[in-house]
Image (cartoon, rainbow, N blue to C red):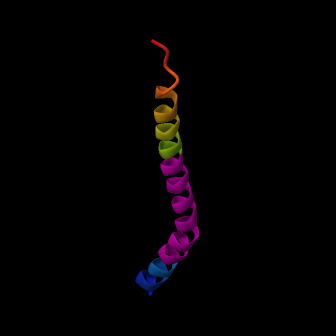
Amino acid sequence: MFDDRFKRTIKKIVILVEPLIITVMGMVVGFIVISMILTVMSVGNIKF
């Protein structure tokens, strides 16, 4: 009985937290990609 209730509670928590984790991971990956693109673009602007 306790084990079944515990499993249901954990499942509910995972269902609620999963979209948040996916969103945060997407933002981190997007930040890394944008910073790499900006770095590559700025290399052409260096004056020797």
Residue located at (50% from left, 40% from top): 37
Closest to the observer, 44 or 33: 44
Residue 22 is inside the magenta segment: yes
Q: Residue at x 47, y 43 (%)?
A: 32
Residue 13 vertical placement versus 27 (above, below): below
Instruction: From the top left corner, tell me how far across and down residue 25 is, in percent.
Output: 49, 55
Q: How many marks do you count on the picture?
A: 0
Q: Quadrant of the C terminus?
A: top left
- Residue 42: percent from left, percent from top: 51, 28
The answer to whether 48 appears left or right of 23 in the picture is: left
Q: Is residue 20 left or right of residue 44?
A: right
Up/down of 31 relative to 15, above or below? above
- What is the chief secondary structure element of the magenta stretch? helix
The span shown in magenta is 9-30
Q: Is residue 6 above or below residue 32?
A: below
Front-lying residue, 17 or 26: 26
x 48%, y 32%: residue: 39
Task: Locate residue 41, reporting x and y percent.
Answer: 51, 34
- Which quadrant: the N terminus? bottom left
Outermost residue toward the bottom in this view: 1
Residue at image position (58%, 70%) is: 16
Q: Quadrant of residue 2?
A: bottom left
Tell me if residue 19 is in the magenta stretch: yes
Q: Is residue 21 above or below residue 13?
A: above
